[in-house]
Amino acid sequence: MAIEITPRIKIKVPAWTIVIAIVLLILLISLTAVYFYITFSSKKISKELEERNIVVVPLEEAITEKEEELQPISQKIDDFNESLARHKKTLDIFTFLEGTCLPFVWFFDFDFDSDTRKVNISGQVDSFATLDQQINILKQESALISSNITEILINEEGNINFTLSLIFR
């Protein structure tokens, strides 16, 4: 018996199916590589986030502590600003008196009311002539609304004690 070899039938595969298979194989390999890359990167990023959270938590606590320390200081600053806003400009009364008073006039008592801008000053002079000159000088001042003598007394040494009431503009 003779063995006969049957020739193999060649299967003809169209070229387009081979191209599609190669493209699909490349896509499968690419997708697998991208999957592993994304997985590895996400794990790395997760570790970095955990490390940063470990660092951030103490920082947040430190910030909270500092804010608590600064709260009373902030309150003091706010109170000072409020006080400063309500502060009225005071008159420079002492400079005014120094410039307008005669050399033989001595003051020994001073009372100032900032709401009415009124000053009561007790003083002493050696004569009525000096007191009259002082009152005339004060009446000529444009910074004053009025100037009045409220008390005049002669003391044991012969000096004249007086009280002036000055109202400023």
Image (tube, rainbow, N blue to C red):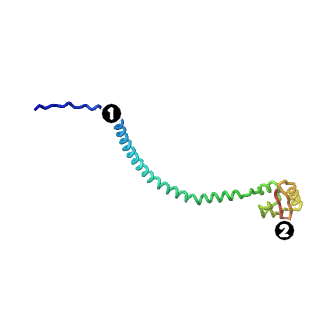
The nearer-to-camera label among 1 and 2 is: 1
What type is the residue that disc 2 sits on? Asn
**Residue lying furthest left:** 1
In the picture, measured across the screen, residue 78 lies left or right of residue 59, that is: right
Asked whether residue 102 appears in the rendered view, the answer is no
Q: Would you place residue 15 above or below residue 166 in this image?
A: above
Give the residue at x 38% y 44%: 35
In the picture, measured across the screen, residue 139 lies left or right of residue 48, that is: right
Give the residue at x 48% y 54%: 59
| Residue 155: mark in rendering | 2
In the picture, measured across the screen, residue 71 lies left or right of residue 37, that is: right
Tell which of 101 and 3 is nearer to you: 3
Report x, y in % for residue 55: 45, 52
Which corner quadrant holds the N terminus? Answer: top left
Which corner quadrant holds the C terminus? Answer: bottom right
| Residue 125: mark in rendering | none
Report x, y in % for residue 60: 50, 55
In the picture, measured across the screen, residue 95 lies left or right of residue 4, that is: right
What is the CA distance from the residue labelled 1 to the residue labelled 2? 132 Å
Report x, y in % for residue 77: 63, 57
- The answer to whether the residue labelled 1 contacts the one labelled 2, judged by CB atoms less than 8 Å apart, is no
Q: Secondary structure at mark 1?
A: helix
Local packing at callout 1 (Cα closer than 10 Å; few below 14, some 14-19, many 20+) is few
Report x, y in % for residue 36: 36, 44
| Residue 18: mark in rendering | 1
